[in-house]
Image: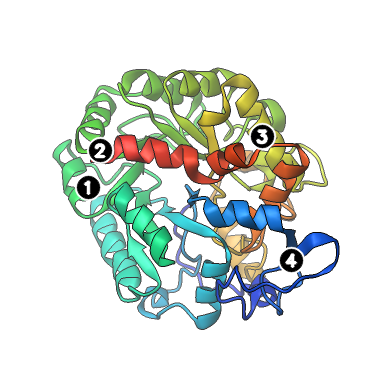
Amino acid sequence: MKQPEISQPKLSRRAFVAGAGGAALAFPMVNFGYYSLSAASPRKYSKRAMDIVGEALVIDMLAPLHMDFSPDANTKPPSEQAIADFKASGITGFHNAFGLGGPEAYTHALRYFADWQGYAGRSPDVFALIGTMADLEHAKASGRIGVIMGVQNADHFRKVEDVKTFYNLGQRCSQLTYNSQNRIGSGSTERVDGGVSDFGFEIIKAMNEVGMLVDVSHSGDQTTLDAVKLSPVPIAYTHSNCRAISGHVRSKTDEAIKALGDKGGVMGIAGVRQFVSKTEPTNITHIADHIEHVIKLTAIEHVGIGSDSDLYGYDDMKPEQNKMLRSAYKGSYAFREKIDVDGFDHPLKMFDLTEELLRRNYSAENIKAVLGGNFQRLLRNTWK
């Protein structure tokens, strides 16, 4: 997702978890063995689903902390409602990443890291900046939100040495490209994909050396395959989907998914409507279909979640903001009236997904792997 300069979105889905405060253990009993996260929440979940989410280290590998792009948005602390929603979500690891690019990408990236890490750092009781897996595990234990800093592009790497500079500034994941061509490779919406360049190969090596996760979620088909092959360590598609299901150019081919699994990588399933299903309705069952497709091509160890939105989704944005967001992409993105997936568009979406996987007879162990265990393993082995 690009970071446009737009006014603050209205996020109306916050209200239904009002008062939850993250107190997942303080739920009232209701009929049929289902529970509510709080007296104020109309959503109810089975004890088994709540236990699984509560025990898992849940990682959303593309989840901006918020999608308010007004100039002063990060100067304000999170509201009490936002804090309650973060804690109620069951998610510990938020990969906070936006698309930065162009000739001023290096300068913009410096400001970006200062801005977002300042936002998190000024609320240390709520957020924990993540540099190692131990940091993320400590965030889980202390009930805080782990912020994994990333960028959905690599234009800010002007030279190979910049990789270490940004690692030292806190960056732990980088996409090689966004949707367009850069010095490293081709994006998914380019007419021609020339694959990873010589400079790109050097950037991948530098990322491997410092311990920064390589991501090619938005990259074109050849660039994706090249990155998997050229990196001696596993990489990720942090937020993508299966082209065999959706037919969308931004989704990954079966060949790419198999290649990723063969190298030990992990693919996070995204919740953008047109990436998920060719037809309507599009709901959380289709998210589970993508999970199952990856498992069939590889194994349970190679799939996770990268929702590609904040806790509330895109569809609550004001009309003019939504229009501005859509206008930043090529027509091949084929936006529909709605962007979010039904049932996966609210702060408690991980509980809904867990219920869907339970309905499909997934074990608790396998659900925990999907919710975060697989990315936990990948990040532990990547970060240094």
Name the residue at 48% across, 28% down: 220
Of labels 1 and 4, earlier in sequence is 4
Q: Of residues 80 and 55, which is closer to you in this image? A: 55
Judged left or right of residue 294, residue 224 is left
Position in image of residue 365 (x %, y %): 58, 39
Name the residue at 52% across, 30% down: 301
**Residue tagged by mark 4?**
35
- Residue type beneath disc 4: Tyr
The Cα atoms of the two marked residues, 4 and 2, are separated by 41 Å
Q: Say if residue 183 shows up in the picture.
A: yes
Furthest residue toward right: 31
**Residue tagged by mark 1?**
167
**Residue tagged by mark 2?**
211
Of labels 1 and 2, earlier in sequence is 1
Q: Are marks 2 and 3 in contact (CB under 8 Å)?
A: no
Mark 4, mark 2: which one is toward the viewer? 4
**Residue tagged by mark 3?**
290
Mark 1, mark 4: which one is toward the viewer? 4
- Residue type beneath disc 3: His
Q: Of residues 76 and 143, which is closer to you in this image? A: 143
Of labels 4 and 3, earlier in sequence is 4
